[in-house]
Structure formats: C-alpha cells, structure tokens
Image (cartoon, rainbow, N blue to C red):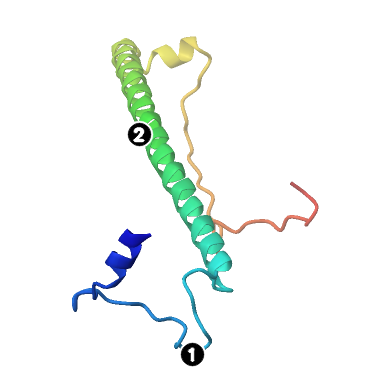
Amino acid sequence: MTKLLKISKYKPSIFQGRLDFASAQGGMSLLMEHPLERIVVRTLSIVLIALICGYLYFVSASVLNVIARKEALAQTAKIEGAIGGLESRYFALSHGIQPSAGTSLGLSPVKQTQYVYRLGNVGVATRVARNEI
C-alpha cells in the first residue's frame, strides 16, 4: 500500500495526454460500442469477401482461357496440317483429269448457256412464323 501512495505523488509528464470522452457531446466512450459499428463491420466484411471471390473467379477464368487458347492453337495446327495434305492430294489427282474424261463419266458438253436474273434484292429472307424454329 505504501508503494501505491508513493506512485500517486508523481505528476504526469506534459507529453502524456489524457482522453476525456466524458466531456464530449453525447458522452462518447471507447468502452461502449457505437450503434453503427456492427453494421459497418458487417458491410466491410461482406465487401471484402465479395472482392476476394471476384478475384478468385477472374484469376481462374484467366487460367482456363489460357489453357483453352493453347488447346485451340494445337487443334488449329493439326487441322492446318490435314488441310495441307488434302490440298496436295487434290492437286495431284486434278492433274490426271482431262476434259475428255467427262464423256466416260456420263457428262455432256454444254452447248447453250442461260443465266437467271431476278430484279430486286437477292438476299430477301422469307417470313418465318413465330412458333417455328
């Protein structure tokens, strides 16, 4: 008890401050929770969780798009190789065909050529009923 009395006789330094919330308007105190504090904390935590979920979604979507792009490029290269082989085979086979080979296939030469011409728009679409697919 004597030590407590001895400590109490020292004055605080001028650099030590004191928070006096009792004199503030409305009697604010750090010991009491502010009425809006729970709402603000919940709102901020929901926003933080939404931002984290959005970040994870966009990162995973980017990774999946990169993987899909690599697969598409691989399939494109494979298809281009197949097309190149088919083109070379077509050109090799087309050199052996002569106009005289048409008669052996049952084709006849065209003597009179007639072309069809329609006035107006060529690309006019017909009307489709609403319930038709």
Q: Nearer the viewer, residue 111 or 45?
A: 45
Left or right of residue 84, residue 63 in this image:
right
Is residue 98 visible in the rendered structure shown here?
A: no
Residue 107 point in image, percent of width and height: 51, 19
Left or right of residue 36, residue 4 in this image:
left
Residue depicted at 45% across the width and 53% down the height: 51
Residue depicted at 52% across the width and 62% down the height: 41
Look at mark 2 in the image and give the residue it sits on: 66
Q: Nearer the viewer, mark 2 or mark 1?
A: 1
Q: Quadrant of residue 20?
A: bottom left
Is residue 124 visible in the rendered structure shown here?
A: yes
Q: Nearer the viewer, residue 65 or 50?
A: 50
Q: Residues within 10 Å of mark 2 (few under 14, many from 20)?
A: few
Is label 1 in a helix, a strand or a loop?
loop
| Above or below, comparing residue 70 to residue 29 in the picture | above
| Of pointers 2 and 1, the one earlier in the residue sequence | 1
What amino acid is labelled 2 in the image?
A: Val
What amino acid is labelled 1 in the image?
A: Gln
Residue 11 point in image, percent of width and height: 24, 76
Residue depicted at 51% across the width and 56% down the height: 45
